[in-house]
Amino acid sequence: MFFKNYDVYENKLSEQLSDDNPYKKKLIEMETPSEKHPIYTILVWSLLIYCWMFFIAMFYKQINQSYLYNLKLVISSANIIFVTLAICLCYKKNYLIGTNSIYRRNSYIIFVLSVIFSVLIETADSGNITRTELVETFFFFYVINSKSYIALAIVAFIALGIASSYYTCPYELYRGFYSVNKIYNVCSSEKKLLDKWFLICAIGFFIYLPLIYMAFTPAKDDFNSKIKLLSVAGLFAIIPFNTTIYIGRKYYKCFAKAYKQERRYTDD
């Protein structure tokens, strides 16, 4: 949705409620833009710093090893630079809404490059790994092995996914769904549109860990091979996608509770 070009229509649900409704204040807060997002800031910069520490440790330990290790280091070097630049482009900018043409263009470029790096990273992968070794690989201060560059890429793309998931208030994400539905008549109401996409959001949430596992393990058939090649890019793309749907639906659910409460007062 955040790649789509559409007109924006206002639909502040708090205006449909009476002043004495206990949920109205909360809805107004969700409609009010805020520049303070400490959890977002901490997650983005702490993960990016961890990635650079990871990369330096991996580079130092693997630089004099085989040609394959050097190839992985080249891919990792290009990838960490790409992710760092992309995070600088996305940081505290409303890429999710999709109304800014420059942001949309940047989103296309970042997504395409993430797919290319995902394919390069997974093409260079070989060998099996146990689940214990998989977990250990994410801790560079504990172990550096032939799969470390995949762990580094995953952490880097998670950081990028969080960076590109910035929003100033939940209402803006809901308004995007409302505007798209108003223009294209996808469903009979924005509630049905949100519920429809929430199912895909839930699927994305539950396949996250399997995708990480597939990124580390050899593919068993052609179908798994294609998923493996795109697994790292998928880990990045799922985060802003799920954020958009979850937060937009959260805003509408708050209104649904408020409306139900108001109906109850009216019936009484």
Image (tube, helix red, strand yellow):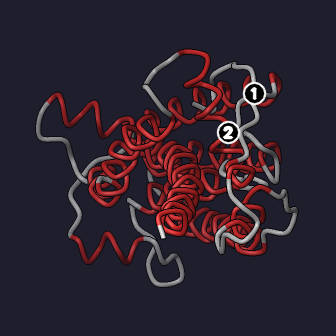
Please report the residue visible at 76 percent of the width from the left and 35 percent of the height from the top: 10
User: Considering only order in the chain, which callout, 2 or 1, is on the residue closer to the N terminus?
Assistant: 1
- Residue 52's spot in the image, x, y percent? 69, 65
Q: Considering the numbered disc 1 on the image, is that residue within a helix, a strand or a loop?
A: loop
Give neighbour class at mark 1: few <14, some 14-19, many 20+ (Cα, 10 Å).
Answer: some
Q: Nearer the viewer, residue 175 or 82?
A: 175
Q: Confirm or deny contact between disc 1 and disc 2 (CB under 8 A).
A: yes
The quarter of the rendered structure image containing the N terminus is: top right
Q: Nearer the viewer, residue 125 or 99?
A: 99
* Residue 194 badge: none
- Residue 147's spot in the image, x, y percent? 38, 59
Q: Considering the numbered disc 2 on the image, is that residue within a helix, a strand or a loop?
A: helix
Please report the residue visible at 68 percent of the width from the left and 50 percent of the height from the top: 16
Amino acid type shown at disc 1: Val
Left or right placement of residue 102 versus residue 187 in this view:
right
Disc 1 and disc 2: Cα gap in Å? Answer: 7 Å
Q: Residue furthest front?
A: 268
Q: Nearer the viewer, residue 263 or 254?
A: 263
Left or right placement of residue 116 versus residue 29 in this view:
left
Give neighbour class at mark 2: few <14, some 14-19, many 20+ (Cα, 10 Å).
Answer: many
Please report the residue visible at 78 percent of the width from the left and 74 percent of the height from the top: 38
- Residue 39's spot in the image, x, y percent? 71, 74
The residue carrying mark 2 is 175
The residue carrying mark 1 is 8
